[in-house]
C-alpha cells in the first residue's frame, strides 16, 4: 500500500471540494464539463464522483448533481447555532409586521451567511437563500456586524477578503467604510443603499452576546421605491432596533 502524505491528502480534498462547488454553481454537470471547467483529467473527476456518490453526496440523473446529504449537514449547522431558535421567532414576527423580507445573518471566517430568512406577503424575490454567503462590507447586516467588532478585527477581515464592488454603490474605500461604521456604532443601525443589488435597499442592526461581540445581525430588505423617506430612515430602524434588543435580552438567559 502506498503511503498517503499530508500534501496528497490536502490536494485530494481540494479537488473534491472544487467539484462540489462547481456542481453547486452549475446545478448539474457531466464528467466532461467538470473536467474542462476544473482542468482535470476525466478519470480523476470520475474517481471523485464515484466516491462522493457512494457516500450519498452526489446523485446522477442525466448529469451529476449535489445530493440531499448536504441538506442533512446544512440543517445540522443551522439548528446547532445557539441563536437560531431565538432568531426564527423574531424574524417571523418582523416579516409578518412589515410584509417584507427579513433575515438573520451570522459571520464566520470573515464572511456573512444567511442563517434564516422569512418573507412577508409583499416581499420581493431575491437569491438570498439560507446558507448563501457574501462580503460583509456590501450589506446592511454585514456592516452592522463589522461595526460590532474592534477595528483590528475589521482590518483583518478586509485584508483577507478585500472590498470588491457588487454594484456601483458598494463602498470600496476603507476610510469611507470606517467612517460609516462609526455612524453605525453611534446609531446602532446600518443601511444598504443598493450596495449589494441594484434596486434593493436594507436596514440592519447587530445582535450581540453577553461578551459584547456579535452573534449575528437582523436586517429588513425591500425595493428601493418602497424603502425610502421616513419608513427607511426611521420606522424600520426603530422596529429592528427594538427587535434586536429583545433578542439580546433573551440571549442573556439562555
Image: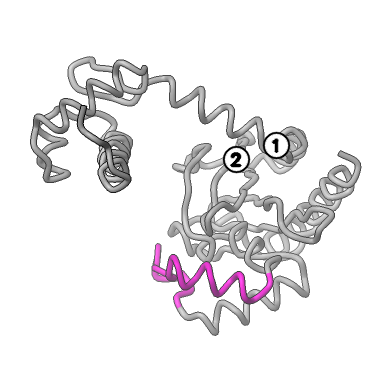
Q: Residues within 10 Å of mark 1 (few under 14, many from 20)?
A: some
Q: Tell me residue 88's x, y (percent).
A: 71, 34
In the displayed structure, would residue 191 be above or below residue 128? below
The answer to whether one can see residue 69 in this image is yes
Q: State the extent of the magenta-drawn residues as a range.
A: 150-172
In the displayed structure, would residue 59 be above or below residue 191? above
Q: Tell me residue 141's x, y (percent).
A: 62, 57
Residue visible at 28% across and 24% down in the picture = 65
Left or right of 222, for residue 22: left
Residues under numbered marks 1 and 2 in contact, where contact means CB atoms less than 8 Å apart: yes
> Most extreme residue toward the bottom, as rendered?
175
Q: Which picture quadrant has residue 208?
A: bottom right
Q: Tell me residue 128's x, y (percent).
A: 49, 43
Residue visible at 36% across and 23% down in the picture = 57
Residue visible at 18% across and 17% down in the picture = 62
Left or right of 136, for residue 58: left
Q: Which picture quadrant has residue 140?
A: bottom right
Label whose residue precedes the other's in the sequence (1 or 2): 1
Task: Pick whichever, 10 or 53, lies toward us.
Answer: 10
Q: Quadrant of the N terminus?
A: top left
- Residue 32 colored in magenta in the image: no
Q: Residues within 10 Å of mark 2 (few under 14, many from 20)?
A: many
Disc 2: which residue: 115
Q: How many marks?
A: 2
Q: Quadrant of the C terminus?
A: top right
Residue visible at 12% across and 35% down in the picture = 33
The answer to whether one can see residue 25 in this image is no
Disc 1: which residue: 84
- Assign a secondary structure to mark 2: strand
Q: Between marks 1 and 2, how big is the CA–CA gap?
A: 7 Å
Amino acid at each position: 500500500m502506498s503511503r498517503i502524505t499530508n500534501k496528497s491528502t490536502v490536494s485530494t480534498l481540494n479537488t473534491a471540494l472544487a467539484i462540489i462547488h462547481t456542481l453547486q454553481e452549475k446545478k448539474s454537470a457531466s464528467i466532461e464539463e467538470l473536467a474542462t471547467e476544473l482542468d482535470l483529467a476525466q478519470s480523476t473527476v470520475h474517481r471523485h464522483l464515484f466516491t462522493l456518490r457512494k457516500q450519498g453526496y452526489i446523485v446522477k440523473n442525466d448529469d451529476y448533481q449535489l445530493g440531499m446529504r448536504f441538506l442533512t449537514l446544512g440543517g445540522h449547522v443551522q439548528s446547532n447555532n445557539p441563536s437560531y431558535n431565538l432568531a426564527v421567532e423574531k424574524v417571523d414576527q418582523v416579516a409578518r409586521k412589515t410584509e417584507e423580507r427579513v433575515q438573520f445573518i451570522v459571520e464566520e471566517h470573515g464572511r456573512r451567511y444567511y442563517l434564516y430568512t422569512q418573507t412577508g406577503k409583499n416581499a420581493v424575490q431575491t437569491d438570498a437563500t439560507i446558507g448563501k454567503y457574501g462580503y460583509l462590507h456590501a450589506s446592511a447586516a454585514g456592516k452592522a456586524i463589522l461595526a460590532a467588532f474592534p477595528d483590528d478585527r475589521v482590518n483583518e477581515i478586509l485584508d483577507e477578503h478585500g472590498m470588491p464592488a457588487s454594484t456601483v454603490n458598494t463602498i470600496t474605500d476603507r476610510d469611507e467604510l470606517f467612517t460609516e461604521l462609526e455612524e453605525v456604532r453611534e446609531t446602532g443601525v446600518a443601511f444598504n443603499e443598493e450596495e449589494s443589488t441594484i434596486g434593493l435597499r436594507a436596514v440592519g442592526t447587530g445582535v450581540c452576546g453577553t461578551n459584547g461581540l456579535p452573534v449575528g445581525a437582523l436586517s429588513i430588505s425591500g425595493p428601493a421605491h418602497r424603502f425610502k423617506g421616513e419608513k427607511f430612515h426611521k420606522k424600520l430602524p426603530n422596529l429592528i432596533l427594538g427587535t434586536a434588543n429583545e433578542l439580546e435580552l433573551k440571549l442573556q438567559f439562555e
